Image (cartoon, helix red, strand yellow):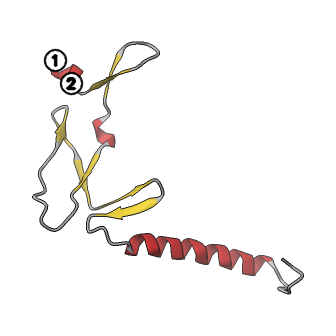
Amino acid sequence: MTSYHKASVLTPASGSVRPFNTSKYKVMHIGRINQKFQYSMDNQNLKTVSNQRDLGVQLTADLKPSIQCQKAYTKASKVLGMITRTFSYKGRDSY
């Protein structure tokens, strides 16, 4: 098997071989004692990141939730500000 076929995917519709887009893949080293190896795919080094958003959750290399909490707080504040600006009278009958 050639190196071209090692890093490729077979598409079911056409049956042809398409290479992976290695620029889309990233590596996150998690933990303090991680040795931080350099990973490669198809003879191209993968980009190393310290934080990444996946499925709407912000992940960091130290696994602390501070960035996720900050983003949730910012989004909630924007929504509350929009509600405050939208309603001029805020009585119990309004909602």
| Number of dots carrying numbers | 2
Q: Which residue sits at x=32%, y=34%? A: 21
Task: Please tell me the numbered disc located at residue 57.
Answer: none
Question: Label 1 neighbourhood size at 10 Å, few (<14), some (14-19), many (20+)?
Answer: few
Q: Which residue sits at x=57%, y=71%? A: 75
Where residue 62 appears, as percent x and y from the top left, is 26, 68
- Quadrant of the image containing the N terminus: top left
Where residue 36 appears, as percent x and y from the top left, is 13, 56
Marks 1,2: beta carbons within 8 A: yes
Q: Is residue 72 left or right of residue 64?
A: right
Q: Is residue 82 left or right of residue 33?
A: right
Question: Label 2 neighbourhood size at 10 Å, few (<14), some (14-19), many (20+)?
Answer: few
Q: Which residue sits at x=44%, y=13%? A: 14
Residue that protrudes farthest toward the right in the picture: 93
Quadrant in the rendering for residue 2: top left
Where residue 50 appears, as percent x and y from the top left, is 27, 62
Against 13, residue 82 (above or below) is below
Q: Is residue 11 left or right of residue 50?
A: right
Q: Which residue sits at x=31%, y=30%? A: 20
Task: Please tell me the numbered disc located at residue 2.
Answer: 1
Residue picked out by circle 2: 6
Q: Secondary structure at mark 1?
A: loop
Q: Amino acid at mark 1?
A: Thr
Q: Is residue 89 left or right of residue 69?
A: right
Where residue 70 appears, as percent x and y from the top left, is 46, 75
Give how far apart the Cα atoms at labels 1 and 2 are: 7 Å
Quadrant in the rendering for residue 6: top left
Q: Amino acid at mark 2?
A: Lys
Against 48, residue 21 (above or below) is above
- Quadrant of the image containing the C terminus: bottom right
Q: Secondary structure at mark 2?
A: helix
